[in-house]
């Protein structure tokens, strides 16, 4: 099973909102803050707020750590 297939399960486990799910899916594809803001039609500040929530819920401190967690746990 691919890591991308596991994202919905992770979203359930960590109780991510729909927007947080969308952000994680794009982050594992390598989107920057600016690209996330553009793709989701939100400001870079809002992206940062969502990232803080994702990090808090997941117990991590960085995007790199989040991507590592997705790929190392499920591949």
Image: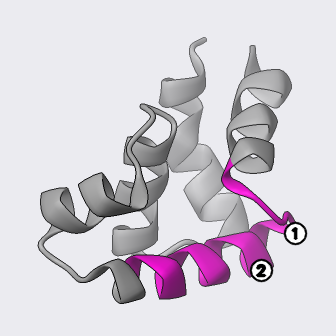
Is residue 75 rendered magenta in the image?
no
For the point 26% across and 53% down, the residue is: 35
Q: Are marks 1 and 2 in contact (CB under 8 Å)?
A: yes
For the point 12% across and 73% down, the residue is: 41
Q: Position of residue 9 (x, y in %)?
A: 60, 46
Is residue 50 rendered magenta in the image?
yes
For the C terminus, give its image quadrant. top right
| Circle 1 Cα neighbour tier, 10 Å, few/some/many (<14 / 14–19 / ≥20) | few
Q: Position of residue 47 (x, y in %)?
A: 40, 76
Q: Position of residue 7 (x, y in %)?
A: 54, 42
Counting the numbered discs, the total is 2
The quarter of the displayed image where residue 21 is located: bottom left
Report the coloring of the rendering.
Answer: one colour
Which residues fall within the magenta stretch? 47-63
Establish if 34 lies above or below 15.
above
Query: For residue 2, which numbered disc appears in the image?
Result: none
For the point 76% across and 59% down, the residue is: 62
Task: Name the dominant secondary structure of the magenta segment.
Answer: helix
Please give the residue where the numbered disc 2 appears in the rendered image. 56
Front residue of 61 and 7: 61
Please give the residue where the numbered disc 1 appears in the rendered image. 59
């Amino acid at each position: 099973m691919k890591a991308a297939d596991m994202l919905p399960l992770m979203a359930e486990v960590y109780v991510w909102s729909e927007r947080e799910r969308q952000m994680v899916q794009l982050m594992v594809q390598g989107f920057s803050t600016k690209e996330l803001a553009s793709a989701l039609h939100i400001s870079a500040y809002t992206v940062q707020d969502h990232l803080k929530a994702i990090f808090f819920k997941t117990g991590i401190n960085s995007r790199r750590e989040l991507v590592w967690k997705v790929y190392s746990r499920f591949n």
